[in-house]
Amino acid sequence: MSILQANDRSVFPDPVYRATVLKPLFDGATHHHAAALARIDRAHLVMLVETGILDAAQGAAIARALVAMDREIDPGSLTYGGDVEDYFFHRERELKHRAGPDVGGRLHTARSRNDIDHTFLKLGLKPRIDALLQAGRGLLGTLIDVAARDRDVLIVAYTHGQPAQPTTHGHYLAAVIEVLIRDLERLEAARTIVDLCPMGAAAITTSGFPIDRHRVAQLLGFAAPLQNAYSCIAATDYLTSVYSALSLLFLHLGRPIQDFQFWSSFEVGQLYLPNAFVQISSIMPQKRNPVPFEHLRHLASQTVGRARAVVDVMHNTPFTDMTDSEAETQEMGYQAFDVAQRVLGLLTATVGAGQIDPERVSANLSRSCATITELADWLVRSEGLSFRLGHEIAADVARAVVATGGDLPRDGFAPFVESFTRHVGRPPRAGQGEFASMVSPEHFVAIRDRFGGPAPAALDAAIRGYRTSLDAFHERAASRSAFEAAAARDLDTRIDEIARGA
């Protein structure tokens, strides 16, 4: 007998289809989405009773059955047997067994798996977004605190991999803070799209029954129903918005992570991680390996890759209900959230623990003549030269100091006098002391007190603004949490009342 004869292809499910599609989907639903489906059943029942679509007796029987099912059955312990298509039908079968086929079958009035699926998928996304936003606020708060702590701590700022100018660690972190604020705002904006409820769209076009979509949305803790019913089952921009925002967040965080690894190299050495974060070599006893930065870099990249994969799955899909946007794609996205949490936790810890090494910063600033731009600026302001001429004199001084391995404040005055006299035809007005003070890194930072600059007053004002943004993030999170907690209490209360026939 052939394999085709042995396997009756007229009986659902085909063994291969069962193993490759139905069982993984069932297992994923019981692991990730069972609690959300239970909430949807309860909210839909409340609405059916409140609108009179079901009478009180029918509602009470279904409510009691749902409460018992949720109390007595652990979805995670279920094993797929192939006797139903998916977890939804397993749950419906159990409900009909407990409440009776006629009454139990009435819960599905005016709904479809189409609107149910996207609703429980959104319910699965919201707490993940909220947890990530919470971790992001933790990182933001640490960055702000360290920026304030290191307001006056000098670092070398690099461009094209070369020492460029002195600034402060606080000023550098302020730039990271501003990007992080914008990234968290993007993720919040994506959450507002997730926070629109698809329930009531049914398969495509809503229902002929007098349903109350706003009530279901409120009971489930959504801000509002998603208006267009076709959009409820076809639009996947809630997915693409979330994972695009997630991808950008970790793409952007990867850039300062790369800087931190560079700063902690032996040759640069301006960032020091304490021993609690340092691994040793198995063969070279002198090695201090700040490997958290390596893990942060590749985990951030993993997050970006996983998030982009979700967005890419949506490419060229039809504008209709389709499986591409559903459970297995969502579960792939959950992996991005899991890795993202690891990044934010480790980055928060390393940012808080890291310290700038002032001696290495001073040596690197001195060797690189990184303050020489201020000499050109100063010649314009105090000697009336054009910037281009000032730039040429400053370049002469830098070449002379670097060639001798000297120190700009100490060894740059003689080359400065020579170049200035040659270009201008007279000696400069400044003496050695004024020159040394003017090309010091402290002066370089202090005089840049413009909006957005590293000087204390400008940076203090920026940090106050960042704390205001952080406070606003906290307030919005608290408001969302309170709204959803109130909705959950309302749902529990109504189900209890309906079950008691009250």
Image: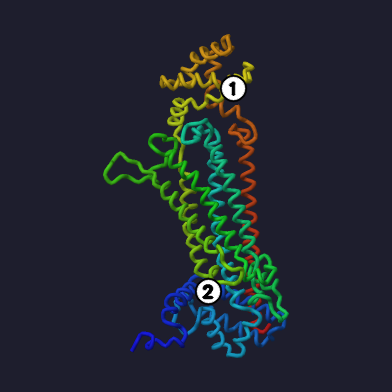
Farthest residue to the left: give it: 283
Residue drawn 51% across the image and 66% down it: 329
Colour mapping: rainbow
Q: Nearer the viewer, residue 396 or 467?
A: 396
Q: Nearer the viewer, residue 264 or 319?
A: 319
Residue drawn 49% across the image and 15% down it: 415
Placement of the C terminus among the 4 image quadrants: bottom right
Left or right: residue 432 compared with residue 226: left
> Mark 1, residues whose alpha carbon is within 10 Å: few (<14), some, or many (≥20)?
few
The Cα atoms of the two marked residues, 2 and 1, are separated by 70 Å
Give the quadrant of residue 475: bottom right
Q: Earlier in the sequence, mark 2 or mark 1?
A: 2
Give the quadrant of residue 78: bottom left
Kind of residue sitting beneath label 1: Arg
Q: Which mark is residue 60?
A: none
Placement of the N terminus among the 4 image quadrants: bottom left
Residue drawn 56% across the image and 74% down it: 37
Kind of residue sitting beneath label 2: Ala
Q: Where residue 447 sits in the image (x, y, percent)?
A: 60, 27
Q: Where residue 189 sits in the image (x, y, percent)?
A: 63, 56
Which SS class for mark 2?
helix
138 in relation to 388, above or below: below
Which SS class for mark 1?
helix
Q: Which mark is residue 34?
A: 2
Residue 133 seen by the camera: no
For discs 2 and 1, the disc positioned in front in the rendered view? 1
Tags 2 and 1 touching, CB below 8 Å: no
Q: Where residue 245 sits in the image (x, y, percent)?
A: 57, 55
Residue 439 seen by the camera: yes
Task: Identify residue for label 1.
Answer: 388
396 in relation to 355, above or below: above
Number of numbered discs? 2
